[in-house]
Image: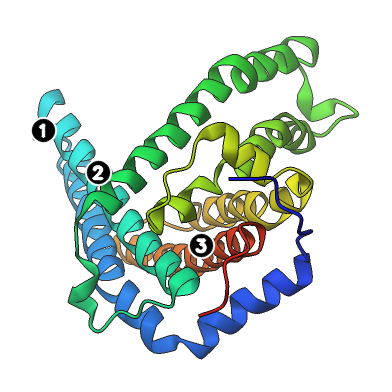
Amino acid sequence: MAESIYKLEIIEIIRKSFSKIIRNKTQVFFILLIPVALYIVLDIADRYIMLRLSAAGKDYFTLAQTIIFSTFKILLELLLIIIVAVNWHRHILLNIKVTSPFSIFKFSRREFNYVAWFLQLFGITILMFVIFVWPMTYLAETLIPDRDNSIIDATDLDIIIYIIPIYIMSRISLGLPAAAIDVRPELSSVFKLSKGNSWRLFLLVGVLPYFLSLITSLLEEMSEDLTTNVIYIICKSLLYVIVTIIEISLLSYCYKHLADIDDR
């Protein structure tokens, strides 16, 4: 990947992303129907089991069983996200249409390459937390022990600490749409492609997930019993669906412009 000669137009990228979703509601429906249904069912079952255990005052699961169940849930949710992402990336970048909700479940070398890049992204994220976020958080708590009464608000301090990791991950994330269309990018080439557009990428694909976490935290506070838990899960799932499809669209159009992929 060579350095891009294009400068991302933030408003134009946002306009195209929303327009693509609105004009292709059938494709969005086909891609999201089964993954979202599975996600909601899995999350409701998980919370229902935990509530029953709490009400009974007993621990029916051994530690090993709990780890196995949690691992299965995380891996399945990750798989669903990857399936949605690959299909929507390919629709935007290559205009490949999904013919039915079941046609999204195709596994080839492409999906494995996407998973490999996703894991690389995850590994770099963990590394960033180990070498930067956690030490900076510890340093902030040491220097400002009473953060509630400090001139610097605790939330503002957290935002400052997370800016650099989010900035770096925004640039690296260009490898995901590339992998979805059978391009196998190197980490250095992805950084080179994003050169000159790094802060635009930060705004387009790095800021939205942060606000999502704030909203879901507010929803979490409302989930007190099974009824509100179900409502919370549905609201959270719909919120994740909306944000995820917008996020994938923004990332796809950023890559489309920077890699100079023709409209199809």
- Sequence-wise, which precedes: disc 3 or disc 1? 1
The residue to which callout 2 is attached is 75
Nearest to viewer (mark 3 / mark 2): 3
Q: In x, y percent, where is residue 103?
A: 20, 74
The part of the image, by quadrant, that contains residue 90 is bottom left
Relative to 157, say whether 12 is above or below. Answer: below
Relative to 88, say whether 190 is above or below. Answer: above
Q: Does 155 sit left or right of 18 as displayed?
A: right
- Sequence-wise, which precedes: disc 3 or disc 2? 2
Colouring style: rainbow
The secondary structure type at the circle numbered 3 is helix
The secondary structure type at the circle numbered 2 is helix
The answer to whether the residue labelled 2 contacts the one labelled 1, judged by CB atoms less than 8 Å apart, is no
Q: Residues within 10 Å of mark 1 (few under 14, many from 20)?
A: few
Q: Quadrant of the N terminus?
A: top right
Q: Residues within 10 Å of mark 3 (few under 14, many from 20)?
A: many
Q: Amino acid at mark 2?
A: Leu
Residue at the spot 60% in from the left edge and 83% down from the top edge: 19
- Any mark on residue 231, and which? none
The residue to which callout 3 is attached is 248
Mark-to-mark CA distance, 3 and 1: 37 Å
Mark-to-mark CA distance, 3 and 2: 20 Å
Q: Amino acid at mark 1?
A: Phe
Nearest to viewer (mark 3 / mark 1): 3
Q: Furthest residue to the front?
A: 2
Relative to 242, say whether 55 is above or below. Answer: above
The secondary structure type at the circle numbered 1 is loop
